[in-house]
Amino acid sequence: MLMNFNKTSYLILFSVLLLQACSSAPQRYNIAQDHGPANSVDLSHVKDAVPKVEPRSKYGNPKNYKVLGKWYSVKQSSAGYKAKGLASWYGKKFHGHRTSSGETYDMYAMTAAHKTLPLPTYVQVTHLENGRSIIVKVNDRGPFHNNRIIDLSYSAAKKLGITAKGVGAVEITAIDPETFQQSNPYQAKVKRTSALSTYPVKNHYKLYLQVGAFNSQQNANKLHKRLSRMFKKRQIHSEFSADKNIYRVRIGPLASVADADELTVLLNKKGIPTTQIVID
């Protein structure tokens, strides 16, 4: 049976296929499968992305989309967005391929992938371990690996100092391009990363695995008791968020990202599929 597609139908179909093709890449990412350039590259000439006013991508901003059985809702605006989490990176394996926005991925450009920020969005990313900060353009979707909040290009990750470990604890702050162009308020705050020397490690944060968030204190207490039985030597915290009226249940503080990832796999096997790394 033939189907009558108009221009809008083709555009929607193309957008979904493009999003799925690009977003599958970060999910499968690990340092063994992907890598940076074979030889050392001088990145001193690579500058931060410069925020500018741009139209929203025609292809990368569906209201909702589904990847690996999970639904994501794209934010209508990036205004006021600020979050802490784990950054990963992707490199040569995807170099030259289309991103979810339709742009070509360049591992030497200062770009990134995010699951829900509108495309494009400019963000400042600060590495919480060494204090380095960069500005990148979010033009792709991902990462869909558990416990990761943003996927950086190779250059961006290298400048932050996370390529060796593969992940790093970061704080992300959205930038308003109009404000940036008018007064450049972020420039003074951003520590330039042209010198790639090692910064002193700060580690002024604690890592937790959030296992549940509830409106009901009773449900939070049930999960707390269940986790206490499963992990007798772990610290289990139940916290009430007054501003959101939510009861959160967390495990931690944890020793490392690897510890959080191992706990996530174990909890999934125990029938607890929804976890989230929280950095305080």
Image (cartoon, helix red, strand yellow):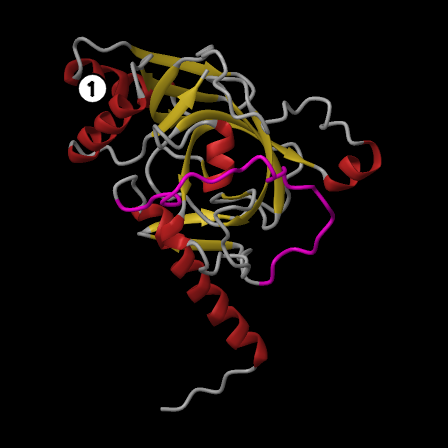
Residue 178: x, y in percent? 78, 41
Q: Which residue is painted at 55% across and 55% down in the image?
A: 61
Side of 43 where 71 appears, left or right: left
Query: Circle 1: is it few (<14), some (14-19), or many (20+) Cα within 10 Å?
Result: few
Judging depth in this view, the residue of 227 and 68 nearest the camera is 68
Q: Which residue is painted at 55% across and 46% down in the image?
A: 109
Q: Is residue 113 above or below residue 79?
A: below
Q: Which residue is painted at 41% across and 22% down in the image?
A: 278
Asked if one can make out residue 135 in the rendered structure from this viewpoint, the answer is yes
Q: Which residue is painted at 73% across and 41% down in the image?
A: 177
Q: Which residue does the numbered mark 1 point to in the structure image?
A: 226
Residue 102: x, y in percent? 54, 61
Residue 116: x, y in percent? 51, 44
Main secondary structure type of the part rendered in magenta? loop
Over which residues does the magenta segment extend? Answer: 33-58
Q: Which amino acid does label 1 sit on?
A: Arg
Q: Which residue is farthest right?
A: 182
Residue 43: x, y in percent? 54, 37
Side of 277 where 195 appears, left or right: right
Asked if one can make out residue 153 in the rendered structure from this viewpoint, the answer is no
Q: Is residue 46 above or below residue 209?
A: below
Q: Is residue 47 magenta?
A: yes
Which part of the image, by quadrant, shows the N terminus? bottom left
Q: Is mark 1 on a helix, strand or loop?
A: helix
Q: Which residue is farthest bottom?
A: 1
